[in-house]
Image (cartoon, grey):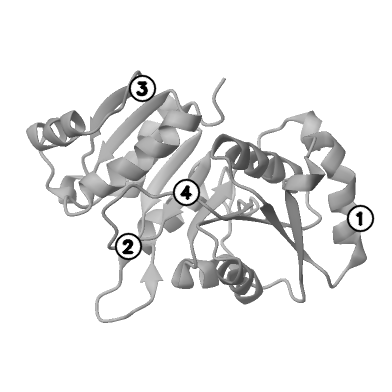
Amino acid sequence: MKLFSKIGLCIQSGKTLKQDLKDTLLLCQNFGNELHLLIAEQAGVESATLEEVLNELDHGALKVKQEFLRGESAQAILKVNEKIKFDLLIVPALLREGLIRYYTGSLARQLVQWANCSVLLIKPSKRRKPKSYGQLVCNIHEHPKSAHTLYTATKIAEGLNIRPLHIAIYASADENYQYFEGIKAKVELDESSLEIHRLKQRTGYSISQSAEKQQADLLLLNSPDTKLGYNGRLIGDELEYLFSELPSDLMLVHSFEDPKYR
């Protein structure tokens, strides 16, 4: 079974359609079986245009399905997610006009808050080739979700042949490092493929700085905790900072109730 068997790509703009598809297909070839294209009404993408772009790209044996959404994007995507049950939703980030900083907008925030699956935010760029992940940073602290996030990071690193896997750990409390030592056996890590970095503070800034220092292409964190009622999650300052800066692509890993990683 693939790591993310069912993947949904949120298409919000026709301008980046081809590039977003290239990036997503690269991940799907390694980790997915099905790709669902979730096309928002405001994207202005027609079925014929989508077919034309897909025919230009090699998606091999991957099953590609199209979902043309109606109404408000986040709610429409969440409704589709209830039916299909995605393992990963990919959201290309948007640029804020007049500013250098990146931002993800309300769509990503709502999906992170309410979707019961992992969410990948793709940082925009002017590149023409498919995105290639060369450096991966996984942020770990003492939390029931962290073992599953670490497992996900190791599988992505293995699938894309990324070495070393950078682990960023909060150093303010020794318990964090001891916890990491304890979960390594569950995840069956290859010690030779790891590089540990200790963070002085548990803040979005310190995580962002660590990712930038390692020139990370992908940063993995636990998804937010449930605090908004049924399936809802509260996005804290740590994530808000990372959303505004987006030092790299950002994956928020949703953990399922798997006792192996508890």
N-terminal label among 3 and 1: 3
Q: Position of residue 214 (x, y in %)?
A: 60, 66
In the rendered image, which residue does mark 1 sit on?
178
Q: Which residue is mark 2?
A: 125
Precedes in sequence: disc 4 or disc 1: 4
Mark 3 lies on residue: 62
- The amino acid type of the residue labelled 4 equals Leu
Q: Is residue 177 above or below residue 119?
A: below
- Residue 116 position, x and y percent, is 53, 39
Residue at point 46% right, 28% down?
32
* Distance Cα–Cα, label 2 vs label 3: 26 Å
How many angstroms separate mark 3 from mark 1 (CA)? 41 Å
Quarter of the rendering occupied by the N terminus: top right
Q: Secondary structure at mark 3?
A: loop
> Which residue position is annotated with label 4?
120
Answer yes or no: is residue 72 visible.
Answer: no
